[in-house]
Amino acid sequence: MAFDVIVSGLNVVDLLVTLPTQYEAGKKHEVDNILIQGGAPAGNAACGLASLGMSTAFLGFNGDNTQSQIALAELARCGVDTSLMLHESGAQPAIALVEVDPDNGDRTVFYSLQGYRALTPAEVDPAWVANTRLVFVDGYDVDGNLELLRQAKAANVPSVIDIEAGDKATLMEMLALASHAILPLEAAQELAAEQNPEICLRRLAEHTDGQLVITDGANGSWALDGDSVIHQGIFPVEVVDTTGCGDAYHAAYAFALLRGDSLAERMQFAAAFAALVARHLGGRTAFPSAQQVHSFIESSSKA
């Protein structure tokens, strides 16, 4: 079966909690919101892409446990195809506890990889890349994802990578293979050994022919366009939760790429999509349609 996008990376179940404004350690406290939802960069991006109408398949492992059932149900709820996922009885998704600050929507994440099973290069089916328009991977399941990137590059299939942290040599290899690399400023600073986002872009461009984009939350995003740097600011909204905002940006960027948008248009669409996601608790709670995003951009330009 052919897909618009195949997505590979960390498979996670999130437990999101809105913290009380004040609380006492060692005591019981009622909170406004507790939400169980699928999460992680690749999983959230897959859901965002599917919500925008892209036929999207997720790669990875699930097992015979409640966490796996939740992860599968969450992907299916968002319209993601799970037919390519592999099964191993003891495998389970990673688990993340996400504490959300009620004042500004910032989140603190605690996670466990106990029982997690990552995709290996030997398990990558060449038919996956041969039957997709775009490969999207994160920087966590690195061995399998590197193989997917190699196959995509060899087959001239475009790829988008979302890399946050990890072994520098491995991340630089992924950077060199990808046709589009989106990374947070902190990761770019670590890889480039620079601080300024524009300088980071130019340093990293020495190691790849791909398109580079750096994101930095409320400060917006930057991309190298030839010798020039494009900066896309954020769209102000009433922020409820920043969980998954970066993932939403990546999904929307990939969607706009497949649609044929220019670099500046991709960045604008991605920023607006992410802003609308931030108005809700959880990274998968409410994805806007493409029309809603464009209407939001238009209304924001008139404000």
Image: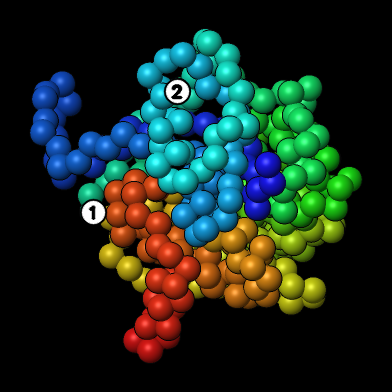
Label 1 or label 2, whichever lies nearer to me, is 2
Give the left or right position of residue 86, taking residue 130 as reference.
left
Q: Position of residue 145 (x, y in %)?
A: 71, 35
Mark 1–mark 2 distance (CA, rounded to whole Å):
33 Å
- Point out the residue furthest to the right here: 154
- On screen, residue 186 above or below 85: below
- On screen, residue 240 above or below 96: below
Secondary-structure class at tag 2: helix
Quarter in which the C terminus is drawn: bottom left
Camera-side residue of 96 and 152: 152
Earlier residue among tags 1 and 2: 2
Please name the residue shown 11% across and 23% down the image: 27
Please name the residue shown 43% across and 65% down the image: 289
Amino acid on which the number 1 mark rests in the picture: Asp
Quarter in which the N terminus is drawn: top right
**In the drawing, what numbered circle is on residue 103?**
1
10 Å neighbourhood of mark 1: few (<14), some, or many (≥20)?
few
Q: How many marks?
A: 2
Give the left or right position of residue 185, taking residue 47 as reference.
right
**In the drawing, what numbered circle is on residue 58?**
none
Q: Position of residue 41 (x, y in %)?
A: 53, 43
- Point out the residue furthest to the top here: 90
**Cβ atoms under marks 1 and 2 closer than 8 Å:** no
Please name the residue shown 76% across and 54% down the image: 158
Amino acid on which the number 2 mark rests in the picture: Ser
The answer to which image quadrant residue 120 occupies is top right
The answer to which image quadrant residue 15 occupies is top left
Q: Position of residue 46 (x, y in %)?
A: 54, 46
10 Å neighbourhood of mark 2: few (<14), some, or many (≥20)?
many
Which residue matches tag 2? 68
Please name the residue shown 51% across and 43% down the image: 80
